[in-house]
Amino acid sequence: MFSKGQLIFAILFIIAFTGLITYTYFRDKQIHKIYYKKTYIILLIFILFIATIAIYSNLFR
């Protein structure tokens, strides 16, 4: 299926990628608090929109 080298590369890639994403998240955490206030409202609207579409698609089947 996968060679030993490919598995080692995949594991190292996942570890490095996760570490990099975590590092940049914590580095930018203070900036996000300043510029992205109340973004949960947009998330809530998006979830309600998708739920509305799902409900209407099931009603008119």
Image: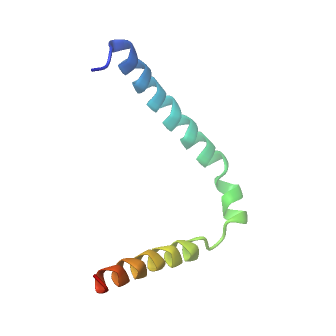
Question: Horizontal placement of 60 versus 10: left or right?
Answer: left
The front one of 42 and 51 is 51
Q: Give the quadrant of residue 11.
A: top left
Question: Horizontal placement of 32 versus 61: left or right?
Answer: right
| Position in image of residue 18 (x %, y %) | 49, 37
The front one of 15 and 5 is 5
Q: Residue furthest front?
A: 61
| Position in image of residue 20 (x %, y %) | 57, 36
Q: Quadrant of the C terminus?
A: bottom left
Q: Quadrant of the N terminus?
A: top left
Q: Is residue 27 above or below residue 43?
A: above
Q: Give the quadrant of residue 37.
A: bottom right
| Position in image of residue 39 (x %, y %) | 60, 70
Q: Residue at x 36, y 84 (%)?
A: 56
| Position in image of residue 41 (x %, y %) | 56, 77
Colour scheme used in the picture? Answer: rainbow
Q: Residue at x 44, y 20 (%)?
A: 9
Question: Horizontal placement of 18 versus 27: left or right?
Answer: left
Q: Is residue 16 above or below residue 47?
A: above
Q: Residue at x 45, y 79 (%)?
A: 48
Q: Give the quadrant of residue 22.
A: top right
Q: Is residue 31 above or below residue 43?
A: above
Q: Is residue 57 above or below residue 25?
A: below
Tally of marks: 0
